[in-house]
Image (cartoon, rainbow, N blue to C red):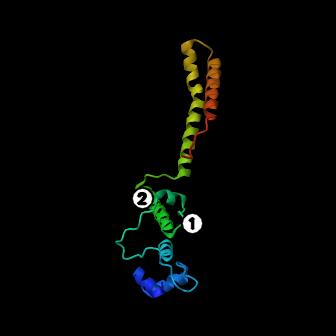
Amino acid sequence: MSIRAYARHRGVSDTAVRKAIQAGRITPEPDGTIDAERADADWAQNTEEPRVGTRQKAPRVQSDLVDRGASPAGGTSLLQARTVNEVVKAQANKVRLARLKGELVDRSQALAHVFRMARAERDAWLNWPGRVSSELAARLGVDPHEMHVALERAVREQLQELGEVAPRVDG
């Protein structure tokens, strides 16, 4: 089939067919004619859908292919790359909005705050035996020094056990 005949078959201009041949989207026979079936398959595989206006919906892409970033032919198509780009933009906008609403906190500030709170808690427990040992010793009728030493040892053992627990702050 000639280039002009194939253009009529496709419903495009012969210039469009020549551009497709030049761009490598379709391949003519060695004698310059075009095998319509093979050229139609090549045209469909190698040509993007035309973008007419902004009201046309983009074709749906299989989500598992987008997640893997690959097309059935083994590469990443332009449509898939654009889809992934739009998903990333949407996620970034969602994070930005959450930050503006005050729903997100700075990780380093949160870790520093938790550290300060844990340090204050530890210090309070270390000071507790000194505050209560004499009162407890009087109630129980035991030596205040021995009570203080026993309470301090018990508190330090407890804090040591608590210190061996590693908190997860990564998610």
Q: Which mark is residue 95?
A: none
Question: Badge 2 is on which residue?
Answer: 97
Q: Is residue 137 left or right of residue 10?
A: right
In the rendered image, the residue lying farthest to the left is: 55
Residue 101 point in image, percent of width and height: 40, 55
Label 1 secondary element: loop
Dots 1 and 2: beta carbons under 8 Å?
Answer: no
Residue 85 point in image, percent of width and height: 49, 65
Residue 116 point in image, percent of width and height: 56, 43
Q: In percent of the image, x 54 and y 51: which residue is there?
A: 107
Q: Is residue 11 left or right of residue 169?
A: left
In this view, the residue in front, 137 or 4, is: 4
Three-letter amino acid code of the residue under disc 1:
Gly
Question: Badge 1 is on which residue?
Answer: 75
Three-letter amino acid code of the residue under disc 2:
Leu
Would you call the spot at circle 2 few (<14 residues within 10 Å), some (14-19), or many (20 or more)?
Answer: few
Of marks 1 and 2, the one in the foreground: 1
Q: In percent of the image, x 63 and y 30: which residue is there?
A: 161
Q: In percent of the image, x 57 and y 64: which residue is there?
A: 74
Residue 54 point in image, percent of width and height: 36, 73
Vertical relation: 135 (above or below) 44? above
Dividing the picture into quadrants, the one containing residue 68 is bottom right
Indicate which disc, 1 or 2, sits on the residue closer to the N terminus. Answer: 1
Alpha carbons under labels 1 and 2: distance apart: 34 Å
